[in-house]
Amino acid sequence: MPQTDHYIHSDDIHPIDIVETVAVHHEWDFDRLAEDQIAMVVEGQWRSYSLTLAWSPAEEVLRLICTFDMDPPADRLALIYETLNLANDQVWDGGFTYWAQQRLMVWRYGLVLAGDAVALPEQIDQMIRNALIACERFYPSFQLVGWGNTAPAAALDIALGEAYGRA
């Protein structure tokens, strides 16, 4: 992301204000749900991703939730969970979970800003970018396991393989 620090003129700014600045910079549609929460939809290669970022002053955490719809057949759910575990072993920041009741695949990450730490726009941009990269990277694997009758380890090989170009 190009430098966005010239848009932010205060060291004492609310983390959600910074998220809003990043969203404006990328021209993403967003909705400021409350002072401490913002939601947006970002288009990926595979699908649209819903992102919600919320600030908890008590915990001093900026939490990112990135979701996409997924309703695999009930008999494939155990294999989806196995795929989630294998995928989570491959990522350093954040992790996947599946919310069965809402039929949502979820990427979660929390940025701890304890001790009056201030998030930089580049940090927030990177945490959003990492969420989108992880979802795009593993989406085909979740699809193959859910509907393609592919074993979790074999489906993960697709996500972990090197890509050279685009078909």
Image (spheres, helix red, strand yellow):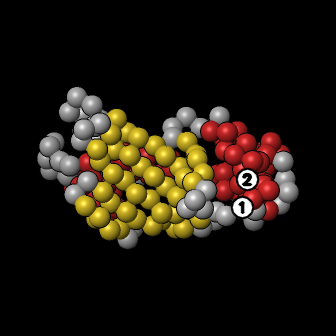
- Given residues 110 and 44, the one toward you in this image is 110
Residue drawn at 40 percent across, 57 percent down: 52
Q: Can residue 25 be seen in this view?
A: no
- The numbered mark, 1 or 2, whose residue comes first in the sequence reads 1
- Given residues 8 and 104, the one toward you in this image is 104
The spot of residue 15 in percent (x, y) is 26, 48
In 3D space, how far apart are the residues under numbered discs 1 and 2 (Cα atoms)? 7 Å
Q: What residue type is labelled 1?
A: Pro
Is mark 1 in CB contact (under 8 Å) with mark 2? yes
Q: Report the residue marked by disc 1.
A: 72
Vertical comparison of 25 with 82: above or below: below
Disc 1 residue crowd, few under 14, some 14–19, many 20+, Cα 10 Å: some
Q: Can residue 9 be seen in this view?
A: yes
Residue drawn at 45 percent across, 67 percent down: 41
Residue drawn at 32 percent across, 68 percent down: 31
**Secondary structure category for the residue under label 1:** loop
The spot of residue 47 in percent (x, y) is 59, 67
Q: Find residue 103 and name its label.
A: none
Q: Report the residue marked by disc 2.
A: 77
Q: Is residue 68 left or right of residue 155?
A: left
Identify the image quadrant of residue 12. Answer: top left
Vertical comparison of 56 with 103: above or below: above
Q: Which amino acid does label 2 sit on?
A: Leu
Q: Quadrant of the C terminus?
A: bottom right
Q: Is residue 136 left or right of residue 77?
A: left
Residue drawn at 22 percent across, 28 percent down: 115
Disc 2 residue crowd, few under 14, some 14–19, many 20+, Cα 10 Å: some
- Given residues 160 and 135, the one toward you in this image is 135
The spot of residue 83 in percent (x, y) is 72, 45
The spot of residue 16 in percent (x, y) is 27, 53
Q: In this view, does 2 lie to the left or right of 132?
A: left
